[in-house]
Image: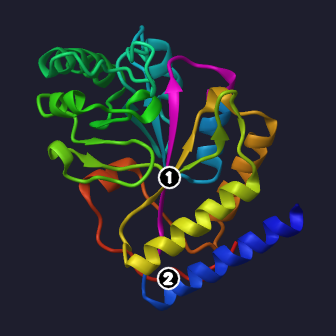
Amino acid sequence: MQLVENALWLLIRVECAAWRRQGHTPLIWWRDDDAREPTESLTHLLNLAENYDAPLALAVIPDRELGPLARALKGRAGLSVIQHGCDHQDRSRGKAPSSEFDPTETAATIAARINDSWRRLNEAVGATAVLAPPWNVLPANAREALLSTPIQAVSVYGAANDGKAGIREINTHIDIMKWRPAHFRGAIAILTRLWRQLRSRRRARRWNEPIGILTHHKNLDPDAWAFLETLLAKLNSRRADFSWRSIEQLLHGQPDPHLTPNCGA
């Protein structure tokens, strides 16, 4: 297993070198979901982000008193808060996929709920105007509703559909967990996906499309925590040719990054 992991890191280094020869640096960002209140796992997550100088977009569910969470987040370097739905309740009426937003509701009803939740979240923690919908599902009526809210972008999982219903997408692409039941996806699967994401962007010359890492701190098992720390250490090493971006930088746009010293992990 370790030999395969080492081989995959080598492929990633080779891919980074190919990016560098074209004068570009891969962009990477990190979103973590389901924060509601201070917990031991949240503290561990925040400490890792600070220790490895990795900007973190924390998706918060604004369905309760946020004072305790706001106090726990205060002063954390490199941390941004985004909105994780309104209450994380499944309104799909038993149909797949799960969704917080009932596709039969009016856009005006959804917009009112999002606006109310956004106000409470922003007043408590000073949030960034990005919505990460629970289960990464946003039906058409919810997309329409966002046009009547302060939200400027959404973050789901997978390839982006920028401009759909006038809302940008800043998506995640690599979830380190598998679900039903929740368990660590495995280093080989994750590194393979990272390599493929790098390769596909280079071949399509999508230099400015960031690769999003997705975590759920409440669900990480010991193997997932250990891998996450290894990943952050490698991607933040002085030899790693990745350029980290905060959600604010992605939302407001950045010039195309160019060479950084060397590629490797």
Q: Residue at x 49, y 91 (%)?
A: 21
The picture places residue 65, in percent across and down from the top left corner, at: 42, 8
Q: Residue at x 45, y 78 (%)?
A: 202
* Residue on which disc 1 sits: 173
Q: Residue furthest bottom?
A: 21
Left or right? Give the position of 46 relative to 93: right
Q: Earlier in the sequence, mark 2 or mark 1?
A: 2
- Residue 104 visible? The answer is yes
The picture places residue 96, in percent across and down from the top left corner, at: 45, 25
The picture places residue 38, in percent across and down from the top left corner, at: 58, 19
Q: Residue at x 46, y 30 (%)?
A: 135
Q: How is the image coloured?
A: rainbow
2 or 1: mark nearer the eye: 1
Residue 184 image label: none
Q: Secondary structure at mark 2?
A: helix
Q: Quadrant of the C terminus?
A: bottom right
Where is residue 80, by image quadrant?
top left
Residue 19 image label: 2
Q: Residue at x 70, y 55 (%)?
A: 189
Crowd class of label 2 (few under 14; some 14 to 19; many from 20; radius 10 Å): many
Where is residue 233, by image quadrant?
bottom right
What residue range appears in magenta?
A: 25-42
- Kindly identify the amino acid type of the residue bearing the numbered disc 2: Trp
Q: CA distance from mark 2 to mark 1?
A: 19 Å
The verdict on residue 37 being magenta is: yes
Q: Is 50 situated above or below 27?
A: above
Q: Is 35 situated above or below 138?
A: above
- Kindly identify the amino acid type of the residue bearing the numbered disc 1: His
The verdict on residue 263 being magenta is: no
